Every structure is written in structure tokens, then in C-alpha cells.
């Protein structure tokens, strides 16, 4: 199961009820934080997400509304007595950002591993994270986070292979033990869970492909109306209609709109525009939470 909590849905400047960009994915006792805009620490506390359990921070890019909450978060983790390392991942240009962030945070009792995302998938606890290039004014990447699901345990195969019953649980969890391997007792992998986070960006092929059939797409919807389409193209953002259309083409199971312009105080017009293409679109709001579980099987 993955618990997704939308911590901040604003772009450029926070509003009283809207923190800047941030999303938390919690699974297996750990949390991956996507972006860390101003207000993220308050949102973590307000919406019941443990800062202490954050293992990775994935930054889409280095504009202030996506990263200026990070030094304070590092200081808080220090005050909580954290000793486990923290991994911070972002697009090209990480070296220029890591130094100032570390200087603002001050000495820390834990290591921070600053890494550029590249193009290859990497692990974050039980999740497989795949960076994807976005179309913004600066280097920017989205992330597809996948929780795999092992094949069904085959009791007949386990018995035929002479696997002791005491080892079944560990093999089912993917562990090789006492000369036995999971492939001896498991069927083909089953459908896992996928969440795609893509902001700030124009609609693009990389997002559409990564989001194909995803359980949740949380995507830039800066402008509610196509009257601002020229502005969206200029600044590297999407209109709500465009985001809804991409979600429909990709066949996503759920769509959350996020990263609204500070000028947007009424979400309904943009939501209506998105729903013309994707009827089940949801206007993301701070604190919105969803628990994703594997498909039930007969």
C-alpha cells in the first residue's frame, strides 16, 4: 500500500491555505518527499506525515517555490536526533544548489547524499523511481514511482521443490534463503502501483508515456483557462484543460491537479476545464490524501 499526501499545491507564492509545491509518498515505514517548497514543514505536521521517516527528497527543479523549505527541514531532522542518511535527488545543476542548502542548514549529525537524477531508475526503499525529463524554462524532471508486486505464491511448486514451510514467507517476500530462490515458488509478477509527479512542465511525451495506466498522476495545472495558453507556453506550465487531455490520452486511473498560480483563488473553473477531457479529475488541495492498494484478485 502507498499513502499519498498532497502537502502543498501552490506555485510561486504561498497563500494562507495553500503551501508551495510538495507531495509525500509513504510506504513500508518510510516516506519519499517530492519537492520541498515553503510551508512543507508545517504541512507535514498538519497532515500527520512524519518528517523523521523521510528517506529521500526528490526535487523537480531548483526554483525557490520548490526548494526553499529544504534547509529548515534539514535543521528539524537534526533537532530530532536523526543519524540515518538522507538522499536528495534533482536534475542537472545539483552541485550549485547543494552547497548553499548545506550552508543554510548548518552542521548536521547525518549525511546528506546529493545526487543528480540522470535517466536510470533507482531504488527508494521498496519503490523504484524513474526520472523523466520535463519541459520547463530550466532543467526539470518528473518522477514515476513504482511499487512492484511479486507473483502469487505457488504452494504446489514449493512442495515439489522441497521448500520447508518455515521459509515460505521469506521467499514470498523476495528473499533468497538456504539455497532456495523466489522464482522457484512465485508466479509471474502482478500489477504493482505507480504514481507519477510532474510539475513544472508543459504537456509532453515523456509524462504521457510514464503516466500510461498509472494509478495516480499529479500534474501541473498552473492556469485554469486556455486564455492563458500563450503564458503557459512561455513559462513552461500547463493549463487545466491540457492536463486533463494528457491524463485521458494516458489512460490514468486518477488525476490530481496541482501547482496553481497564486492568482487562482477559485479552483472550480479549472477543474471544469480538466473534466471536459478527464471527467474524474480532482482539484488537488493541501492535505488531500489517498491510500493506494494492489488490485483485488478473484
Image: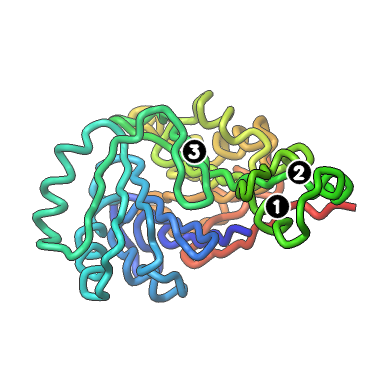
Label 1 – label 2 distance at C-alpha:
7 Å
Q: Is residue 92 above or below residue 70?
A: above
Question: Sequence-wise, which precedes: disc 1 or disc 3?
Answer: 1
The residue that label 2 is drawn on is 186
Q: Residue 31 carries which label?
A: none
Task: Indicate the secondary structure of the residue bearing disc 1.
Answer: helix
Other residues around mark 1 within 10 Å, as few (<14) / some (14–19) / many (≥20):
some
Does residue 10 show up?
no
Q: Which of marks 2 and 3 is in front?
A: 2
Q: Distance between the residues labelled 2 and 3?
A: 45 Å
Does residue 261 appear in this view? Answer: yes
**Quadrant assignment for the N terminus:** bottom right
Q: Position of residue 179 (x, y in %)?
A: 64, 44
Return the x and y of residue 71 as percentages of the image width and height: 20, 59
Determine contact: label 2, label 3, CB under 8 Å.
no
Q: Do the residues labelled 1 and 2 touch (CB within 8 Å)?
A: yes
Q: In which quarter of the image is residue 69?
A: bottom left
Specify which label sits upstream in the sequence, 1 or 2: 1
The disc at residue 239 is: 3
On the image, the x and y values in percent for residue 39 come to 31, 65
Residue at 32%, 43% in the rendered image: 89
Percent x, y of residue 143:
46, 40
Residue under numbered circle 1: 172
Q: Residue at x 60, y 44 (%)?
A: 194
Q: Answer with left or right where residue 231 lies relative to residue 193.
A: left
Q: Nearer the viewer, residue 260 or 192?
A: 192
Q: Name the side, left or right, on which 105 lies relative to 114.
A: left
Of residues 266 and 159, the one nearer the viewer is 159
Amino acid at each position: 500500500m502507498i499513502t499519498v499526501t498532497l502537502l502543498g499545491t501552490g506555485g510561486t507564492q504561498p497563500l494562507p491555505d495553500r503551501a508551495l509545491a510538495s507531495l509525500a509518498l509513504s510506504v513500508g515505514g518510510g516516506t519519499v518527499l517530492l519537492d520541498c517548497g515553503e510551508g512543507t514543514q508545517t504541512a507535514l505536521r498538519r497532515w500527520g506525515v512524519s518528517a523523521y521517516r523521510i528517506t529521500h527528497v526528490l526535487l523537480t527543479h531548483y526554483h525557490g517555490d520548490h526548494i526553499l523549505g529544504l534547509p529548515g527541514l534539514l535543521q528539524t531532522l537534526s533537532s530530532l536526533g536523526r543519524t540515518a542518511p538522507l538522499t536528495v535527488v534533482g536534475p542537472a545543476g545539483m552541485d550549485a544548489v547543494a552547497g548553499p542548502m548545506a550552508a543554510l542548514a548548518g552542521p548536521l549529525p547525518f549525511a546528506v547524499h546529493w545526487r543528480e537524477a540522470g535517466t536510470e531508475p533507482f531504488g527508494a526503499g521498496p519503490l523504484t523511481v524513474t526520472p523523466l525529463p520535463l519541459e520547463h524554462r530550466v532543467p526539470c524532471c518528473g518522477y514515476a514511482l513504482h511499487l512492484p508486486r511479486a507473483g502469487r505464491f505457488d504452494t504446489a511448486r514449493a512442495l515439489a521443490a522441497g521448500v520447508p514451510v518455515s521459509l515460505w514467507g521469506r521467499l514470498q517476500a523476495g528473499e533468497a534463503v538456504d539455497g532456495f530462490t523466489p522464482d522457484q515458488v512465485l508466479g509471474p509478477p502482478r500489477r504493482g502501483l505507480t504514481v507519477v509527479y510532474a510539475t513544472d512542465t508543459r504537456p509532453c511525451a515523456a509524462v504521457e508515456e510514464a503516466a500510461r495506466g498509472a494509478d495516480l498522476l499529479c500534474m501541473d495545472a498552473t492556469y485554469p483557462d486556455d486564455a492563458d495558453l500563450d503564458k503557459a507556453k512561455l513559462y513552461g506550465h500547463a493549463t487545466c484543460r491540457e492536463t486533463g487531455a494528457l491524463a485521458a490520452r494516458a489512460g490514468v486511473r486518477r488525476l490530481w491537479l496541482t501547482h496553481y498560480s497564486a492568482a487562482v483563488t477559485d479552483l472550480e473553473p479549472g477543474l471544469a476545464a480538466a473534466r471536459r477531457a478527464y471527467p474524474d479529475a480532482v482539484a488537488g488541495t493541501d492535505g488531500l490524501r489517498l491510500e493506494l492498494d494492489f488490485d483485488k484478485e478473484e
